[in-house]
Image: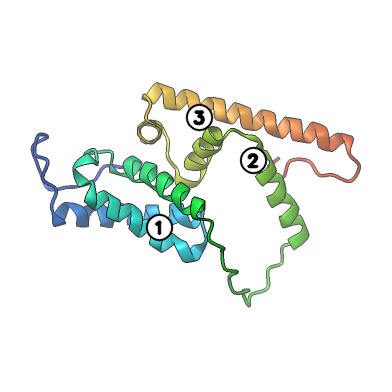
């Protein structure tokens, strides 16, 4: 996933960002920001949260680094989501779909609970790094910009987060093996 944005040609010293710049930013990245929130918040809130991030980008347009717009938007989205969660608004229950799903809900619930438990055992930073990489397709320079570290630091952080995830699964599997009637890793 590339964060390069075709913006009007400007000198690096020119702080002016106009409507055309914002329209290009919106067209290039609004869907990615919206999907970021769909995966992390109630679907009813995703559009409003994405709009908050884009409004912040407009207000702080001089702070958005050229060539690293998407990482900046993801970082801002993390702050917007944290503020949203602190509000503690109840999440409305969505309508039940009419389509029949052949998957066994009990197995899906167990697998989902197991994945959540293992991710929950990780440090918030490791969890964030893994989810940005797995869900958003962010790596390399973009991950470095989001985390506010060098490229080497981002690569090392991703490697450490993966190692900790493997260890968390191994610990969970070892515990599960000792208990009768439990499952192994759903990702295996």
Question: Closer to us: mark 3 or mark 2?
Answer: 2
The residue at the point 44 percent across, 49 percent down is 83
- Which residue bears the numbered disc 2? 120
Q: Nearer the viewer, mark 3 or mark 1?
A: 1
Q: Quadrant of residue 174?
A: top right
Q: Image point 20% across, 54% down: which residue?
A: 22
Q: How far apart are the two marked residues, 3 and 2, measured between alpha carbons?
A: 17 Å
| 145 vs 1: above or below | above
- At 48% from the left edge and 39% from the top edge, which residue is drawn? 133
Q: Secondary structure at mark 2?
A: helix
CA gap, disc 3 and disc 1 = 26 Å
Which numbered dot is residue 134?
none
The residue indicated by pointer 3 is 158
Q: Position of residue 162 (x, y in %)?
A: 58, 30
Specify whether 70 is left or right of 106: left
Instruction: Say if mark 3 contacts mark 1, CB within 8 Å.
Output: no
Q: Earlier in the sequence, mark 3 or mark 2?
A: 2
């Amino acid at each position: 996933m590339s964060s390069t944005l075709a913006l009007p040609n400007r000198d690096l010293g020119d702080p002016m960002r106009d409507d055309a710049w914002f329209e290009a930013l919106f067209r290039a990245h609004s869907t990615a920001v919206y999907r970021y929130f769909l995966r992390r918040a109630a679907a009813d809130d995703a559009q409003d949260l994405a709009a908050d991030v884009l409004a912040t980008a407009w207000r702080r347009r001089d702070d958005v680094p050229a060539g690293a717009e998407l990482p900046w938007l993801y970082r801002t989205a993390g702050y917007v989501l944290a503020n949203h969660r602190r509000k503690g608004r109840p999440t409305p229950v969505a309508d039940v779909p009419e389509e029949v799903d052949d998957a066994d809900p009990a197995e899906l619930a167990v697998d989902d609970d197991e994945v959540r438990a293992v991710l929950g055992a990780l440090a918030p930073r490791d969890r964030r790094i893994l989810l940005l990489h797995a869900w958003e397709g962010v790596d390399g320079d973009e991950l470095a910009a989001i985390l506010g570290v060098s490229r080497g630091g981002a690569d090392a952080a991703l490697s450490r987060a993966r190692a900790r995830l493997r260890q968390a699964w191994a610990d969970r599997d070892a515990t599960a093996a000792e208990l009768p009637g439990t499952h192994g890793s759903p990702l295996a």
